[in-house]
Image (cartoon, helix red, strand yellow):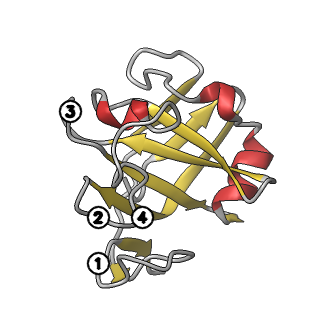
């Protein structure tokens, strides 16, 4: 997803940082303890938005990535000029009501390939979690 563009209504931004959360065996994944009303979209088909609220103040945007029944999503941590998943959602105006949107069918919320090619990617452990730190599933475009 690095180098692709998020388009939401009249705003867009090139994705520069993401984190993967993969399945029930990933202790940092919201689906690690099973399906809940909050995370049920992660158990659905790939290509849907998953937006959740954390710390009583931030929304975070994820894209569901795997086949139905296997919960996995990619957290969008940053787009060009906006660093931080909470800031991204605030500036774009993305809230919990934008969860479970089909990004392949929506005319106002989707991911677009504009031909940008990422030259170098750095992998590291994920940020802001206490478990699953052994997984090098944070990916950042190196400029």
User: Circles 2 and 3: CB distance less than 8 Å?
Assistant: no
Per the model, the C-alpha gap separating discs 4 and 2 is 12 Å
From the viewer's side, name the closer residue of 93 and 111: 93
Which one is earlier in the sequence, the residue at label 3 or at label 1?
Answer: 3
The residue lying at 56 percent from left, 26 percent from top is: 109
| Residue 108, image quadrant | top right
Q: Secondary structure at mark 1?
A: loop
Which one is earlier in the sequence, the residue at label 4 or at label 2?
Answer: 4
Q: Which residue is mark 4?
A: 19
Q: Which residue is mark 1?
A: 135
From the viewer's side, name the closer residue of 88 and 125: 125
From the viewer's side, name the closer residue of 77 and 51: 51
Quick one: label 4, few (<14), some, or many (20+) residues within 10 Å?
many
- Disc number placed over residue 69 in the picture, else none: 3
Decide: is 52 above or below 20.
Answer: above
- Disc number placed over residue 26 in the picture, else none: 2
User: Circles 1 and 2: CB distance less than 8 Å?
Assistant: yes
Q: Percent x, y for residue 107? A: 53, 15
Q: Secondary structure at mark 2?
A: loop
Which one is earlier in the sequence, the residue at label 1 or at label 4?
Answer: 4
């Amino acid at each position: 997803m690095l180098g692709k563009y998020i388009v939401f209504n009249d705003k867009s931004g090139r994705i520069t940082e993401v984190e993967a959360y993969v399945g029930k065996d990933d202790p940092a994944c919201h689906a690690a303890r099973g399906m809940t009303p909050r995370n049920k979209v992660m158990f659905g088909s790939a290509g849907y938005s998953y937006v959740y609220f954390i710390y009583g103040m931030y929304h975070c945007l994820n894209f569901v990535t795997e086949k139905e029944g296997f919960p996995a999503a990619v957290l969008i941590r940053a787009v060009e000029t906006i660093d931080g998943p909470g800031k991204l959602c605030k500036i774009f105006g993305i809230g919990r009501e934008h969860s479970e949107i089909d990004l392949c069918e929506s005319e106002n919320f989707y991911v677009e390939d504009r031909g940008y090619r990422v030259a170098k990617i750095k992998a590291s452990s994920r940020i802001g979690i206490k478990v699953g730190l052994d997984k090098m599933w944070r990916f950042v475009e190196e400029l």
